[in-house]
Amino acid sequence: MPFADRRDAGRQLGARLADLGPADPVVLGLPRGGVPVAAEVARALDAPLDVVLVRKLGLPARPELAMGAVGEDGAVVLNRDVLARSGVGEEALAAVERQERAELARRARAFRGDRPRVPLAGRTAVVVDDGVATGATARAACAVARTLGAARVVLAVPVAAPRVVGELAGEVDELVALETPPGFRAVGQVYGDFTQTPDEEVVALLAGRGPGQVDA
């Protein structure tokens, strides 16, 4: 496996990004799985760490398949191809969006608490996830970073589907993907340990504590 776990992936990704030297970076992890990766990247870049909150809009009959994503400040990205093939109507799409926006608000309270966002205006937003499969969530995250005033947006991931890399490259200022396996099936295929990241670990990392150092 190229990566033992998300922290190992983050260290490798951070080393690559440190060589590129992004100007005045803010590292934005996609909860939950992207945050352990992003924490290592932030350490490598000596940059502040925050989250960029987006939620996948899964098909009603197949929630694992993204028909789009929503993000903070009203950002919406739709996968028109998936919508066309699935035949999902506006009412069903709106119902899924309402559900995911409620979860978005919950996560903002849970992860940030009373802490304000790290300002992005005029800075380089380094958007980090543990991998990219369809690209909908990453696309929404980058749109949110632009909305919040980032001067440059870098999308950085340990692994991505080759097709999606081509689609996303024109939507960001720079794209870094360490692995783009020709036989891509799922993000987890390149990880030895791909267990789910709990909310408590995300909160601890954002508060500057290491994994396992959660409040009693």
Image: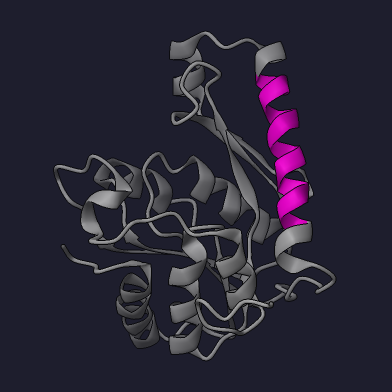
Q: Is residue 180 above or below residue 59?
A: below
Of 111 and 88, which appears nearest the observer? 111
| Image quadrant in which the C terminus is located | bottom right
> Where is residue 179, by image quadrant?
bottom left
- 12 is higher (above) or lower (below) than 197: below
Name the residue at the right extreme: 114
Residue that extends furthest to the front in the rendered view of this protein: 216
Question: Which color scheme did the rendering employ for the protein?
Answer: one colour
Query: Which residue is painted at 46% across and 21% down in the image?
Result: 62
Q: Is residue 162 above or below residue 92?
A: below
Query: Residue at (43%, 12%) from the top-left corner?
Result: 85
- Chain part drawn in magenta: 93-108
Task: Return the residue nearer the eye: 77 or 159.
Answer: 159
| Quadrant placement of the N terminus | bottom left
Q: Is residue 203 above or below residue 80?
A: below
Q: Residue at x 70, y 73 (%)?
A: 120
Residue 60, quarter of picture: top right
The secondary structure that most of the magenta stretch takes on is helix
Q: Position of residue 76 (x, y in %)?
A: 66, 38
Question: 211 or 54, which is in the foreground?
Answer: 211
